[in-house]
Amino acid sequence: MIRGAKSLTGNNQALFVVDGVPVDNTISKTLDPGTRGNMQATGRGGYDYGNSASDINPDDIESINVLKGAAATALYGSRAANGVIMITTKKARKGLGITVNSGVIVGKIDKSTFPGYQKQYGAGYSSTYQKDGFLFFDVTGTGTKDYVVPTTEDASYGVKFDPNLMVYQWDAFDKSSPFYMKKKPWVAAQNDPSTFYQTSVSTVNNVMLAGSSDKGASSWALHGMKIRAYCPTARSSRISSISDRATMSPISSPSAPWPITRRSTERAGMARGTAAVT
C-alpha cells in the first residue's frame, strides 16, 4: 500500500512490475465455504498464504521505482490505480559469476513491555465457594474431602497464597501430569506469559549463477528461508524465488533481445509460478 488507503472495496494493493512483467499481487486467502468471503477479514480462522509479490527475492533486485497517479495509470491502466512498484532485477555480466549470500536474524521479545502480575492471591473471586475460598470434595474416593482450586474462574482474587496449605490444582486432574491425583503447596506459579516465548531465529540463503556472451545472457537464482518464530510451535521453511532469466538475441535482429523470465515458489505445501516472454 502506497501512502494510505485508495479504495473503499478493500483492495489497496499496488501493482508490482518486475522487468516489465506485471506480477499478481492478490493475497491468497481462505474463503468461507458458505459466503465465499474472506475469513481472515472477519476475524475467523484460515490461512494467509501471501502473494506472488512477497516471493520476490531481495537479492535479485537491482533497482526499485515507485509510480503514482497519472504516471502509473497511463502505463498500466486501471490495475495501477493504487500505484506501481517497478522492480528491475540484476542482469548477468560478461563471463560467468557466482554470488552467495547468507544471513541470520535473531530476535527476542521485550519483557519490560509485558504487564506485571501479582503473586499474592490465587485463582477465584472473593467468594467462599464450598469452603474457605476453595471447592471442597472427595477427590480420591477415600471418604476424605480436600481443598480443590476453582480453576474454571478467570480471575485471581481468590485465597491468599500459603506454602503450608496443600491443595489439588488443575494438573491433579490431568492423567499425563506427574502431579496427577496429587496435592501441591498453594503458591504462585513460577512463570508468567512472557516465559512462553522463545528466541526467534531466521536464516536466509541465496545463490545466484549468472553468465553472458555476445549472443545472450542468462541467470539462475535460488532463495531459501527458514524461520523459527517467537512461539514454540511457529515454524516456517520455504524455497522461494527459484528464478531463471535469459536474454537471447535473434538472428534477424541482434540488437533486439528477447527477455524470458520464469519464477516459481514452494511454500507451506503450496506451489506458485509465473512465466512471461516480453
Image: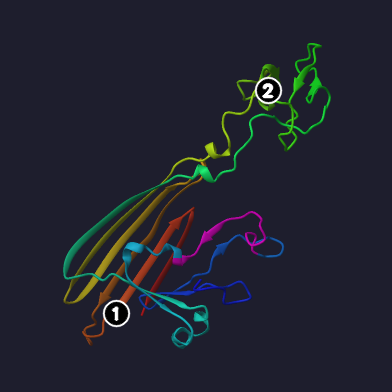
Magenta residues, as a range?
38-53
What is the number of the mark on residue 143? none
Q: Residue at x 63, y 27 (%)?
A: 188
The location of residue 142, given as percent across then percent down, is 78, 11
Residue of label 1 = 258
What is the number of the mark on residue 172? 2
Q: Which residue is drawn at 75% across and 35% down?
A: 153
Mark nearest the camera among 1 and 2 is 2
- Residue 165 location, quadrant: top right
Looking at the rendered structure, the kind of residue marked 2 is Ala
The location of residue 35, given as percent across then percent down, is 71, 65
Neighbourhood count class around disc 2 (C-alpha, 10 Å): few under 14, some 14–19, many 20 upward = some
The location of residue 140, given as percent across then percent down, is 75, 15
Is there CB contact under 8 Å for labels 1 and 2? Answer: no
Q: In the image, is residue 209 above or below residue 182?
A: below
Q: Which residue is drawn at 62% across and 24% down?
A: 177
Q: Is residue 204 magenta?
A: no
Counting residues from the N terminus, which is met first, the one under dot 1 or under dot 2? Answer: 2
- Residue 31 location, quadrant: bottom right
Looking at the rendered structure, the kind of residue marked 1 is Trp
Q: Is the magenta stretch mostly helix, strand or loop?
A: loop
Q: In this view, does 147 lie to the left or right of 7?
A: right
